[in-house]
Image: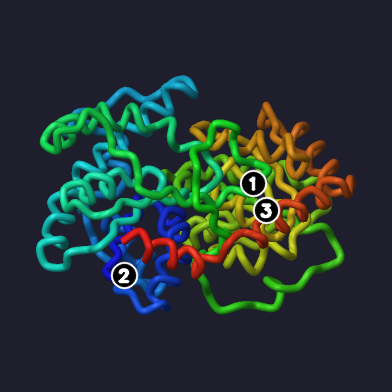
Amino acid sequence: MKILFVASGSPATVFALAPLATAARNAGHDVFMGAVEDMVPYIASAGIPALSIAPSSIRRFATMDREGNPVRMPETPEEELDFAGHWFGRMAAGSMDALREVAANWRPDLVLGGSMSFAAALIAAELGVPYVRQAWDTGDAWRTDPAASEELQPELQVLGLDRLPEPDLFVDICPPSLRPADAPPAQMMRWVPANGQRQLEPWMYTKGDRPRVLVTSGSRLVFAKKTGFLRGLVADMAALDAEVVIATLDEVADELRAELPGVRAGWVPLDVVVPTCDVVVHHAGGVTALTAMNAGVPQLIVPQGGNFVEAGLRISDFGAAITVDENTPEAVEKACRELIGNPSYAERARALSAEIAALPLPADVVGVLERLV
């Protein structure tokens, strides 16, 4: 069986699909994964045959319309969801020519796309093969679909559709206790971390005498050069007498280490480092949140907008995190002290870890894909 996986424009979208893609390859199936050009190295680093299906980075699709005119930036959370739907829609439209060329020479039997990889739905409909949608994280990405359908009207009309087609199967990786009440029926799957790796150093897998706090702003904010968020969070840690680890790109880390002596900074394998931490502080990133939940580590969530905010609040409501309303030094320090000092947060985080571990493995879900075809 040939399976075409379609990721998107950030490493997180590649890493989210990598475990199922790897399981399919290990089961003997032929697997390709496509994404925008600057994500190809991340696909290849995961050991998956990589396709460039759009020449631009996500920035162009996010900031310009199809004619190259600047688009108005969103100002409210509701506008952010529609904004995301439109630019992911533009990315899908910009990927179709390359996907058609691939399909002409390597026709897939099934197409699997991530949460907002709308090109997967379109190419599957064109080819008349099953379409599977896999969640990237615990966020409610379905709310972006109406705006994406609006953006993709030219492509949908050619197919005789007025909106994006429903998937033949939805694969969800959200711990059952955190699934929204209106979540669609799904084939559940255990989330497995698939982040980038590097040579390990002893500090990465050992724990010192002081509390360890990992701080990250995720790949999207880093690629957008919004490093002020990271600097602010690290400065907020100063009063805690904690060991601070900044998970970020190495080119950003060089600058941060010069400004913030005493912190460890750089690209670290989160699946190795996070289990040694007492708290993970982040921007409400979906993959970061899942990594912490998988390891049973409490989280401090400092939302930066988008559809991750609601997902972060569900983790806080469960008791495994604190979401701060205001990103101030006082609020961050107070929340970190509470997370480190109150064992109930770690207990609830471990409960989520147990839920994740009980879900079907990617290898089990490969069998479901086989039956679907």
Left or right? Give the position of 321 relative to 60: right
The crowding category of the residue bearing disc 2, from other C-alpha atoms within 10 Å (few below 14, some 14 to 19, many at least 20), is many
Left or right? Give the position of 182 relative to 114: right
Give the SS element for disc 3: helix
Residue at the (22%, 28%) spot, across then down: 162
Q: Quadrant of residue 59?
A: top left
Q: Position of residue 314 (x, y in %)?
A: 66, 36
Foreground tag (1 vs 2): 1
Cα–Cα span, label 2 and label 3: 29 Å
- Sequence-earlier tag: 1 or 2: 2
In depth, the one of 332 and 66 nearer the eye is: 66
Q: Looking at this rendering, what residue extends furthest in the front direction?
A: 371
- Up-down relation of residue 148 to residue 19 (above or below): above
Cα–Cα span, label 1 and label 2: 29 Å
Left or right? Give the position of 304 relative to 293: left
- Up-down relation of residue 230 to residue 31 (above or below): above
- Up-down relation of residue 28 to residue 123 (above or below): below
> Which amino acid, by three-letter code, is at mark 2?
Val
The crowding category of the residue bearing disc 3, from other C-alpha atoms within 10 Å (few below 14, some 14 to 19, many at least 20), is many
Say which residue label 1 marks.
176
- Sequence-earlier tag: 1 or 3: 1
**Residue 67 seen in render:** no
**Residue 351 seen in render:** yes
In depth, the one of 195 and 115 nearer the eye is: 115
Q: Position of residue 135 (x, y in %)?
A: 47, 48
Residue at the (69%, 51%) spot, across then down: 280
Say which residue label 2 marks.
31
For the residues labelled 1 and 2, say whether their Cβ atoms are less than 8 Å apart: no
Circle on res. 258: none
Q: Position of residue 30 (x, y in %)?
A: 29, 73
Say which residue label 3 marks.
293
